Image (cartoon, rainbow, N blue to C red):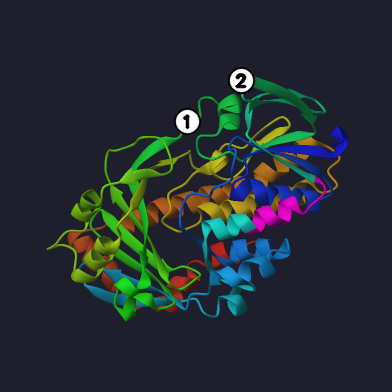
Amino acid sequence: MATSRTIIVAGAGIGGLTASLALVAAGYRVLILEREQKLEEAGAGLQLSPNATRVLIGLGLESLLLPNVVVPEAISVMTVRAAREITRIPLSDAKDRYGAPYWLVRRPDLQAALLAKVKDHPDIDLRLGSQFEDVATYPKGVTVVARKAASDNMARNQETALALIGADGVWSAVRHQLFPQARPQFTGRIAWRGTVDANQLPREFNARRVQLWMGPNAHLVAYPLSDGKHINMVAVVTGTWNRPGWSEPGDAADIAQHFAAPQWPIAPRMMIGAVENWRKWALFAVPDGGVWTKGNVALLGDAAHAMLPFVAQGANMAIEDAATLGRCLKDAGNMQAALAAYEKQRAPRISRVQRTARQTGQIYHLRGAMAFARDHAMRTLGGERLLARQDWIYSWPNK
């Protein structure tokens, strides 16, 4: 692979694969270094809002994804205090409103579609079992050292390229090299995920909508997956457990305590109780605005700006990063200047999304009189006006 037009991407998650496709579309060759021997995306479901689906469709992924997506009709907002729906945010006309659809999709299905595109492109070299180890930067490029696990020894390879993109997640090895002081901080929140057979729940739980249950110090999100036979659930609670990682086994009795009666009504307790196998992960975040570039190295996705999930934008922001990176590097005469432009475009928006996610989490988890005021305000505003408050996110890059 020729060095003169090569960019190395560390990480083959959603952000790294999307970035690789955006970079080859901009005229580059891409070498992807992925430490895992086999790509197995953790997590069950994703909400892809129009700001991200617009990018994926532009990269030619629509035909691969359409058989595996659900187009939700609405977000049903329900609260513990009301014990029922207080408002419904319409989503069925998202494509008309924003120029791109709102999709619910299994993470593995999205990764499989991205991977199929990557493997089909002659200018992308995906190397599994290749762990980024070190980088040296020069005025005109980088030298990257990667460690490959062999049968009896640990072989190291050295690659040269125009730039390195760190898309290797919240515990990014690339970020640790560039910004060792920028360590992810535990947010005091823990996310739990699980799936349940749709036929184990009453029919009203199986509609094509996202259900959001808000309560004191916890909330629950549930929505159907592509086959219609399963419901994806994500519960976020407060706590002190903060082991690094992404997919630890969770005790069903533990999560049930956070949604116990008499505070929580029967419907969310029924949903929580229907899940047999839970996985959990502690939520870590990096500072508002993210950490981005140094010389010919840049970060992307969670490596740059891991955030709380309260506006469902973590993966969407990584996809936006990838598209912006491709645009900034297209016909770039000066790589460092192009990467600086990428940071300049992304950092303010990311900072705003991070702040919005944090504030939304506080609203979701209110109790007492503040929860009553929240419910009243959301009911008064109604779904259309609540959706309008998301226009600045979903209309990107137009707004």
Mark 1 or mark 2, whichever is nearer to me = 2
Q: Nearer the viewer, residue 385 or 233?
A: 233
Label the magenta part by its dominant secondary structure. helix
Q: Quadrant of the N terminus?
A: top right
Q: Is residue 237 left or right of residue 154?
A: left
Task: Return the residue found at the far left.
Answer: 262
* Mark drawn on residue 121: none
The magenta-colored residue range is: 113-123
Sort mark 2 into few (<14), some (14-19) or many (20+) by Cα contacts within 10 Å: few
The residue wearing badge 1 is 183
Query: Is residue 221 toward the left or the right of residue 327 in the image?
Result: left
Q: Secondary structure at mark 2?
A: loop
Q: Is residue 256 visible?
A: yes
**Alpha carbon of mark 1 to alpha carbon of mark 2: how far?**
33 Å
Whether tag 1 and tag 2 are in contact, CB under 8 A, the answer is no
Residue at the spot x=17%, y=59% of the render?
260
Measured from the top left, where is residue 348 in percent x and y? Answer: 58, 48
Picture residue at 50% right of the left edge, 25% below the top: 181
Q: Position of residue 130 (x, y in %)?
A: 65, 32
Q: Earlier in the sequence, mark 1 or mark 2?
A: 2
Query: Residue sitting at 67 percent across and 61 percent down?
Result: 55
Query: Can you say whether 73 is above or below 277 in the image?
Result: below
> Which of 37 and 304 lies nearest the eye of the viewer?
37
In the picture, measured across the screen, residue 58 lies left or right of residue 84, that is right
Q: Amino acid at mark 2?
A: Asp
Q: Which residue is mark 2?
A: 152
| Frontmost residue, 37 versus 57 | 37
Where residue 203 sits, quadrant-wise, is: bottom left
Q: Is residue 84 above or below residue 360?
A: below
Q: Quadrant of residue 148?
A: top right
Give above or below for 96 relative to 193.
below
Q: Amino acid at mark 1?
A: Arg
